[in-house]
Image (cartoon, rainbow, N blue to C red):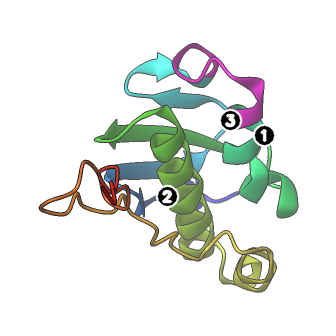
Amino acid sequence: MSAAESIAEWCATGCRKTSVARVWLRAGEGKCKVNKREMKDYFASEALRAYIEQPLKLTSTQGKYDIVARLSGGGVTGQAGALRHAIARVLTVADKSLREVLKNSGCLTRDSRMKERKKAGQPGARKRFQFSKR
């Protein structure tokens, strides 16, 4: 690795619901910090951690890069989805050859599903008040 490659740093953003993830990627030994905490401390669920690491496993880049992430908005699951999306995007910025694998697995697709708004005259988005014929 040359001196220019060792200090290379890439940045990308990812979104899911109302969560936004900003990710910085640099060559390293596989450390992952989320909001200045270790990922296993921030995401207690093993399933969420596996979901987040999916782009790294698909591209066989685990242990090659250090990840620093800033998450804001939403809940834990939305933030995990945003982080997965951001990691997939930053990997394609770092190495263009990984795009095909990530695209085919759906990691680069923004999950556009949002919470539906509450409608007037109803108790929720779809639920109606109880109907009485008589």
Q: Which mark is residue 44?
A: none
First along the sequence among labels 2 and 1? 2
Residue name at image x 51 percent, y 49 percent: 83
Gap in Å between the C-alphas at discs 3 and 2?
28 Å
* Magenta stretch in the rendered image: 40-48
CA neighbours of label 3 inside 10 A, class few (<14), some (14 to 19), many (20+): some
Q: How far apart are labels 3 and 1 at the CA level? A: 19 Å
Please state which of residues 59 and 52 is positioned toward the viewer in this rendering: 52
Amino acid type for the residue under numbered disc 2 = Ala
Q: Is residue 43 magenta?
A: yes
At horizontal 31% and vertical 53% (from top left) the residue drawn is 18
Q: Residue at x 34, y 52 (%)?
A: 20
Name the dominant secondary structure of the magenta segment. helix
Q: Are marks 3 and 2 in contact (CB under 8 Å)?
A: no
Q: Is residue 14 visible?
A: yes
Residue 3 percent coordinates (x, y): 55, 55
Q: Position of residue 130 (x, y in %)?
A: 34, 49
- On the question of residue 7 being in view, the answer is no
> Which of the image's four quarters has the N terminus?
bottom right
Q: Pointer 2: residues within 10 angstroms few (<14), some, or many (20+)?
A: few
Residue 65 shown left or right of residue 124 in the figure: right
Residue wearing tag 1: 63
Query: Left or right: 8 with respect to 27?
Result: left
Where residue 95 appears, as percent x and y from the top left, is 66, 74
Which numbered disc, 3 or 2, marks the residue that appears first in the sequence? 2
Name which quarter of the figure residue 60 lies in.
Answer: bottom right
Q: Which residue is mark 3?
A: 48
- Tell me the element at label 2: loop
Q: Is residue 115 above or below residue 44?
A: below
Give the image quarter of residue 126. bottom left
The residue positioned 30% from the left and 55% from the top of the image is 134
Image mark for residue 8: 2
